[in-house]
Amino acid sequence: MADGTVLFALRESSLGQGAGGGQLRRIREAVEARGLEVRWAGSEADARAVLRTESGLAAAVVGWDLGGGENAPGGDAVLRQIGRRFKDLPVFLVMTDEGDEDLGRLPLWVSEVVVGYVWPLEDTPAFIAGRVAGAARAYREAVLPPFFRALRKFDDAHEYSWHTPAHSGGVAFLKSPVGRAFFDYYGERLFRSDLSISVEELGSLFEHTGPIGEAERNAARIFGADRTYFVLHGDSTADRMVGHFCVGRDEIALVDRNCHKSVLHGLVLSGARPVYLVPTRNGFGLAGPLPPDGIGAGTVADRIAGNPLTRRAVSPGAQYAVITNSTYDGLCYDAVWVARALAPSTPRVHFDEAWFAYARFHPLYAGRYGMSVGPETFAGPDRPTVFATQSTHKLLAALSQSAMVHVKAAPRAPVEHERFNEAFMMHGTTSPLYPAIASLDVAAGMMDGPQGHWLIDEAVTEAVRFRQAVVRTGARIEAAGDRPAWFFGAWQPEAVTDPATGERIAFADAPVELLRTEPACWRLEPGADWHGFAGLDDGYCLLDPVKVTLTCPGINALGETADWGIPARVLTAYLARRNIVVEKTDSYTALVLFSMGITKGKWGTLLDALMDFKALYDEGAPLDRVLPGLVGRFPRRYADMTLDGLCRSMHDHLRRAGLVTLLDTAFQELPEPVVPPQWCYGQLIRGGTERVRIADAAGRVAAAMVTVTPPGIPVLMPGESVGGADGPLLRYLGALESFDRAFPGFGSETHGVTVDPDTGDYSIACLLPGPAGE
Ligand SMILES: *Cc1c(COP(=O)(O)O)cnc(C)c1O
C-alpha cells in the first residue's frame, strides 16, 4: 500500500510538449518514487471528483489556472473544496509565470490555504518531490488523534511483553489449530494492539492520563464538552453510570417514558423513585417528543405529587431528569428549551443521545444536543448540569460498544472529577480493549474540523434525495394513470417555506440545497397534519432528515384509517427477502437510517424494491412467489393466498382490533406505580416473582419491563400495576397476542413478554401476590 495519495490537479494543456510539461511529469515520477500514489486530474471537475472520493489524500499539487470557465481560474474552486473537506491538508500551488508579479495577483486567502508554491522550472524535480513527500508524511502523522498515534508507535517498537493478556501479541493462538484460525482471521495487528494496562506509555483509562487522557480531552474539544469519558461497554453502561452518579436511594428521578432499558437499570442500581414524563404519540403510533407542557414546572410538580412512590422519598424535589434525544424516529429537541423548562424541577439533565452523536457537526442540528446547553446559551444561575451519553458506534464510525459520556457542569450541581470517576470505575472493566479505545479516538478525529461537517452533510444530502425520490415516484405513478395510483410515502412535511423568500414550495420541488441547510424545513410546526403530534410549540422539535420513516397506505398521522392498507410488516418481510433490512417496523411505518455509510446504490436499491412490491401487489402475485419462506413455514395458513389478499386481511384485522386506538388509550394514562424498581429486583433474585399469562395477570404488579413495538417504548415498568382485565394495558397486550396467533411469522416485537410456542399465550413477569413491603 502506498504511503498516501497526492492529487495533481493541473490543466491538461500544461502537460504539453513544452519544457514545463516535461518537468511536471518528472515531478510526478519523483513523487511516486518516494512511495506515494499520484491521482492526476486534468480539470476542475476531475479534481473535485477526486476530493469527494479519495480520503487517503496526503497532499495536493494544484495549478491555479485550471480552466474553471467564465474566466474563473478553477484552481480557486479546488482550493476551497480542499478547505471544506480536509483540515490542514498540505497544498502546493503551481505557478506558471516567472517572477513574483503572479503571486501578487492571488487573492489574500490563498496564502492561508497553501503551504508552498511550485515553479516547475526553478527547482529540480527531485527537490520539489521531496518537499511534497515530506509534507505528505508529516500530514499523515499529524492527522492521527492522540491515542491512535501513540498505539501505532508502540506497536512499531515490538517489545516483549511479560504481562497480560496471555496471548502475548497473538503468539499463544499459534499453538493450536483453532487458535491459528482465529489469528489468521483477524491478522496479527489486532493481537499486537491488544495490550494490558501495564503499558505505561499509553496512559490509563481509569486515571485519564497519558495518551488516553489526551484522547479524551481531544474528544471533549471536538464534542463541545467540559469533560469527556470513554466508555467501552456501550451507551448502556454510560446511561447506568450517569444514573448511578446523579441520583441516590429513595431520591426522585424524572424519567422520559421513552427510555432505553439501561436507564431503568440505572434506577434499579441507584434505588431511585422514578416519576415518568410521557411523550406524545401520533396516528401512526410513533412516539413523539415530551410536549413542552409536560416538562414545565407546574406539570412536573403535579406528577411528582400524584405519584404514590414519592411520599417516601428522602427529599421532595427531583435530583435528575433523563430525556431521550433524539428519539428512535429522529425527533430532536431544542435542548436549551428543554433545559430551561426542567431547570426549576431539577439541577441535572441527562440527554441520552445514543442515536445522535453526529449532531454537533451539522448546522441543521444547532442547539439540539445536550452539549449545546452552556453558559453561552443559558446564562444565569439556573442552568442545570448537563450530561450527554452517546453510542459512538451507532451512527459514527467506531467499533461496537464504543460510547462516550460528555459532561457540562453548572455551579448548581458540580461534577467533581474524582467523584464522578468512582461511578466511572464501578461500571468499567479493569482490562479495557485498546482497539476499542483507539476506535473512540478515531471516531472523534474523523469529526474534527471541516471533514466532520462534510461527512454528515453527505448523509443528510443523500437522505434528502431519497425522500424527494419517494415523493416524485409516487407523483409519477399517479400521473401515469396506467396502474393503481397508490405508493409508499416518506414521513415529512408536504411543503416547506424558503425563509429567504417566504415562498412555499412542495417538498419534492424544493432545492436540495434548501432542504439540507435550512432547519426550518424540518421543524414540527404546531398543529401540522403531517406529523400529527398535539401540543407542540414552534421550533421546539425537529425531524432529523437522516432518519427516514417510510409510510404505507392504511392510516395517516392523525390516526384516520382507510378501507384498505398495507401493514408495514408485510413490506419489511418482502424487503428482508431482498436482503434489505430495515431498522424498525411499526404497524404502517418502517424506519431506515441514512448513516455515513450511505451510497446512492444502497438507497436506489431500496426504492427499486418498493416499486417491485407495488407491482407484485397490483398484479395479485401469489404469496408463495413473494414470500416463499413464509409459505414454506406455514403452508396451511398461507398457501393459496396472494400478496394483496394477505395485506387486506391483515389490515382488516388491525382495524377491527383497533390496535392503534388501544395503544393510544394504553398510553393516555400510565399504569399505577406500586413499588420502586430496586425493590422489584430484590424480589426477583429471591424468587419473589413468577411468570403469569396475561389472561390471568389482572391486578398483578409487573416485575420486569415490557416493551412492545409499536411504539417501541415501555408499556409497563417493574413495580407498576398491570391494571384490570378490561384496563387499557391488558386489552392492548391481548390484541397483540391475538394478532400474533392470526398471522404466524409476523409476530409482534415484544421485550419482556414470553410467547408460549405451542399456544401462543403471552406471559409477563409479575411479583408474587402479597403485601408490597417497600
Ligand atoms: C441503543 C441505545 C442505548 C444503548 O446503547 P448501546 O451502545 O447499545 O449499549 C441507550 N439508549 C438508547 C436510547 C438506545 O437506543
Image: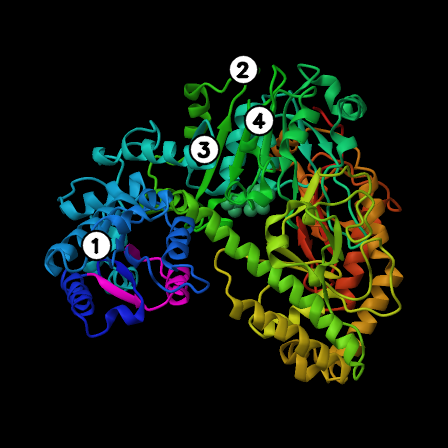
Distance between the Cα atoms at labels 1 and 2?
55 Å
1 or 2: mark nearer the eye: 1
Which label's residue is closer to the chain start, 1 or 3? Answer: 1
Q: How dense is the environment of label 4, judged by Cα within 10 Å: few (below 14), some, or many (20 and up)?
A: many
Which residue is labeled 2 in the image? 411
Which of these two is toward me, 483 or 352?
483
Badge 2 marks a residue whose secondary structure is loop
Q: Residue 427: which numbered mark, if any?
A: 3
2 or 4: mark nearer the eye: 2
Distance between the Cα atoms at labels 3 and 2?
26 Å
Figure quadrant of the N terminus: bottom left
45 in the magenta segment: yes
1 or 3: mark nearer the eye: 1
Magenta span? 36-59
Q: Residue 677: which numbered mark, if any?
A: none
Which label's residue is closer to the chain start, 2 or 4? Answer: 4
Badge 3 marks a residue whose secondary structure is loop
